[in-house]
Image: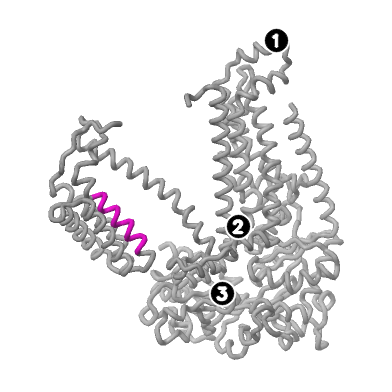
């Protein structure tokens, strides 16, 4: 959107308190870290409010004062907490410089339609802040794990060396442990042997079930559907205990096939749901046209229906794969130590021996997931482009 | 079509391979259940690897001892015992033995005599506490503290746990009454030999909880043995209780600023049970393993990897140096005379009778 709204400088009675409020917010963290919450809040508000006023009314030159502030806060951070303080301080200094002039020059208004009331403008930015906060809360725990996995110590601790960015504080030994330790390699092998087969079973059965259940003439469709997707709704521990006793009686407990079947049952609901969703947009006259031209139902399925519902099948399969790959409760019951999967190994590792190897594995798994999702998304876009469904 | 066929074929193949390998393994495979971490590692090095070399049995390690009682009950109900030998604490062995889930052992018949010629019954002595439990190690639950956070006067007595003025900061305690109640009473002025008499009474339990109440705000409760080492390494807590072997690892192997406080340590035993209801072939193999793993030399060997004292008297003189660090292990044993000046011995009879009752009170107190 082009800047439609004319902007003008705002009064100090507006931007100074807002900047001070931000200063108070960040003061909470610094104050708590240094021992006194109250002093942090008040100090943050006063210092940032005063600096905002000085920069806009006394120095006036934007470039000079923003650089000055960044250097000043960075120095303060360095004095408080060394090199990490310097990095965080530079960021804060840049942020407050930006914030002050963004408010002072009225730039926050520039890209919004001119007819918005102040309340709507406030909500516009509050909404974005809330979204950002949710994003941060979802992502931070995953990000925190990554530097810790390069820890040179055997604990989940940011050591002083790590915080000083001293190379001696970092090491790849937990990755080495993962790739050389028999326990972890066995667990990886088991996971890799179980998940694809379970996925294949879920995808085959789930797709067939979804197609069958989308035929209007099938009796008790809703009841059957409810039963098939129940593994997703029933608490996992109940499915697991039930499977344990049932599989024990039929001799499947503690076997490879038992774990594969259990995971397939957990994956089927995901496939049914995604495939049913894509089938809603599937034009039934296509199957009739195929039949009209002499194709038998199997050929029709593979040549006509399957290519069209493939995106749903693939994403269902992906969910089924991740379910099996991440699953720890059912495998603890249905599997025996011979089928110890990666999540199982991580679980006992967390309970008995808090070793950063778990974090190294987690980091590797996160990267694998990101790669998988990226590939699937690229494939989806490619197929859409080929079919001319998207303009680009 | 082609893709589908390939997929179907590969599924069938994987299945077949899985089946084949599962069957091939069953014949000479045994599952040994333990706690994981450094402890399992010491058992694998000292017992399982030599045993596998000697007999060719393929040993699978399961780290499920924490839920051994529940799992053995479920296995018994399902009629499918998948474990061969299980490492449990002494307290768990009482429950398993009483419920008939563990096999009874004839110690003199089924275990090896000591290297000094003593019968197993004499050699294990007091550590034989019921008919099913084959003792392996003596361990203790004791305290460690951060040397850099306690000032110039490091704690010397277990009662320093309750002294938040001299040692401000958090302390970690196990989330169960055992140990904590005894320490609370001891530090509340109850004479050591009267503690269990006092703890039997309603007022005594109140008194212990009231003492714990004085530090409740500064306690981090742990439930897994790895928690306190992590909290100490983090500097989250000033002092905390955990198993002495964990502290040894933090201090000597991980080189953290932590020191031992042996005062008031609580001795406990850990050992093997063999689940009841194994087939004759598996039972014979499990007995053979246990016989091998609890002989004088093997028990002494374990101490080269972890600082737990061997349960046999005849093993003590054979305890040598740490396998990797080369330090003498004897001074790190909880049973070493210098460390064992003021100890509690886990009172199995008392806790068997009062555990449920005191547990309920303790949990209720926790959530207050």
Tags 1 and 3 both on a single chain: no
| Highlighted range, magenta | A86-99
Q: Position of residue B356 (x, y in %)?
A: 56, 66
Residue B206 shows in the view: no
Q: Which chain carries label 1?
A: A
Q: Which residue lies at the image location 71% right of the left edge and 76% below the top edge?
A: B136
Rendering quarter of residue A127: top left
Residue B54, relative to residue B17: is it above or below?
below
Q: Which chain carries label 2?
A: A
Whichever of callouts 1 and 2 sits on the residue coming sooner in the sequence is 1
Q: Where is residue A353 in the image (x, y as percent from the top left)?
A: 59, 66
Residue beneath label 1, please? A293
Looking at the image, which residue sits at the far top?
A292
Q: Which residue lies at the image location 47% right of the left edge and 71% below the top edge?
A: B172
Give the label, 2 or 3, closer to the camera: 3
Check disc 1 and report its element: helix, strand or loop.
loop
Distance (Cα) linking label 2 and label 3 = 21 Å
Check disc 2 and report its element: helix, strand or loop.
helix
Residue beneath label 3, please? B254
Decide if residue B167 is on the left or right side of residue B267: left
Q: Where is residue A271 in the image (x, y as percent from the top left)?
A: 61, 33
Q: Where is residue B315 in the image (x, y as percent from the top left)?
A: 74, 84
Q: Residues within 10 Å of mark 1 (few under 14, many from 20)?
A: few
Distance (Cα) linking label 1 and label 3 = 74 Å
Instruction: Pick the residue in front: A306 or A228.
Output: A306
| Residue A234 image label | none
Residue A301 shows in the view: yes
Residue beneath label 2, please? A346
Instruction: Pick the residue in front: A366 or A388.
Output: A388
């Amino acid at each position: 959107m082009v800047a439609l709204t004319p902007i003008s400088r705002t009064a100090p009675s507006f931007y100074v308190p807002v900047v001070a409020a931000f200063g108070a917010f960040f003061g909470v963290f610094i104050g708590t870290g240094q021992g006194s919450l109250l002093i942090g809040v008040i100090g943050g508000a006063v210092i940032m409010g005063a600096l905002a006023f000085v920069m806009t009314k006394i120095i006036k030159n934007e470039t000079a004062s923003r650089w000055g502030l960044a250097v000043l806060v960075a120095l303060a951070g360095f004095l408080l907490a060394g090199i990490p303080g310097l990095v965080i301080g530079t960021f804060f200094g840049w942020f407050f410089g930006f914030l002050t002039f963004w408010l002072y020059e009225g730039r926050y208004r520039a890209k919004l339609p001119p007819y918005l009331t102040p309340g709507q403008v406030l909500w516009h930015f509050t909404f974005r802040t809330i979204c950002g906060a949710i994003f941060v809360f979802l992502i931070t725990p995953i990000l925190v794990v990554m530097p810790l996995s390069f820890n040179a110590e055997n604990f989940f601790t940011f050591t002083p060396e790590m915080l000083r960015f001293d190379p001696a504080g970092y090491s790849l030994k937990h990755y080495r442990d993962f790739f050389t330790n028999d326990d972890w390699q066995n667990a990886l092998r088991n996971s890799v042997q179980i998940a694809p087969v379970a996925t294949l079973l879920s995808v085959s059965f789930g797709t067939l079930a979804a197609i069958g259940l989308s035929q209007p003439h099938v009796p008790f469709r809703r009841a059957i559907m409810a039963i098939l997707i129940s593994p997703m709704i029933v608490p996992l521990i109940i499915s697991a205990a039930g499977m344990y006793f049932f599989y024990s009686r039929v001799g499947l407990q503690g076997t490879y096939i038992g774990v594969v079947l259990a995971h397939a049952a957990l994956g089927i609901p995901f496939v049914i749901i995604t495939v049913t969703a894509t089938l809603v947009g599937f034009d039934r006259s296509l199957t009739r046209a195929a039949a009209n031209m002499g194709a038998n139902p199997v050929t029709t399925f593979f040549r006509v229906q399957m290519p069209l519902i493939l995106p749903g099948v693939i994403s269902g399969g992906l969910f089924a794969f991740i379910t099996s790959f991440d699953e720890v409760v059912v495998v603890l019951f249905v599997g025996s130590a011979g089928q110890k999967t990666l999540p199982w190994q991580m679980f006992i590792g967390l309970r008995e021996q808090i070793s950063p190897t778990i974090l190294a594995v987690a980091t590797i798994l996160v990267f694998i997931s990101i790669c998988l999702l990226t590939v699937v998304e690229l494939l989806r876009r490619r197929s859409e482009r080929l079919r001319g469904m998207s303009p680009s | 079509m082609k893709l589908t066929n390939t997929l179907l074929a590969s599924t069938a193949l994987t299945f077949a391979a899985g089946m084949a390998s599962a069957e091939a393994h069953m014949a000479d495979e045994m599952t040994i259940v333990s706690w994981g971490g450094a402890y399992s590692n010491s058992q694998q090095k000292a017992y399982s690897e030599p045993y596998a070399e000697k007999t060719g049995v393929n040993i699978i390690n399961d780290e499920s001892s924490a839920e051994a009682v529940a799992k053995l009950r479920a296995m018994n109900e399902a009629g499918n015992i998948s474990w061969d030998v299980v490492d449990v604490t002494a307290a768990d062995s009482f429950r398993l033995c009483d419920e008939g889930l563990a096999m009874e052992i004839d110690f003199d018949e089924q275990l090896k005599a000591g290297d000094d010629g003593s019968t197993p019954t004499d050699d294990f002595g007091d550590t034989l506490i019921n008919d099913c439990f084959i003792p392996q190690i003596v361990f203790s639950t004791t305290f460690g503290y951060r040397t850099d956070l306690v000032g110039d006067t490091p704690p010397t007595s277990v009662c320093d746990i309750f002294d938040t003025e001299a040692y401000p900061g958090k302390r970690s305690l196990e989330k169960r009454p055992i140990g904590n109640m005894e320490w609370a009473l001891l530090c509340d002025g109850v004479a050591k030999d009267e503690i269990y008499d006092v703890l039997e009474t309603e007022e005594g339990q109140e008194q212990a909880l009231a003492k714990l109440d004085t530090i409740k705000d500064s306690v981090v409760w742990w439930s897994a043995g790895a928690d306190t080492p992590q909290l100490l390494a983090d500097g989250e807590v000033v002092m905390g209780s955990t198993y002495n072997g964990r502290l040894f690892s933090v201090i000597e192997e991980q080189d953290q600023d932590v020191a031992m406080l042996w005062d008031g340590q609580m001795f406990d035993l850990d050992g093997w049970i063999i689940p009841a209801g194994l087939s004759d072939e598996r039972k014979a193999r499990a007995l053979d393993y246990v016989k091998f793993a609890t002989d004088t030399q093997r028990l002494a060997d374990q101490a080269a990897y972890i600082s737990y004292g061997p349960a046999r008297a005849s093993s003590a003189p054979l305890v040598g140096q740490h396998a990797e660090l080369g330090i003498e292990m004897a001074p790190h044993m909880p049973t070493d005379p210098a460390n064992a000046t003021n100890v509690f011995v886990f009172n199995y009879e008392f806790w068997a009778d009062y555990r449920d009752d005191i547990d309920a009170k303790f949990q209720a107190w926790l959530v207050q």
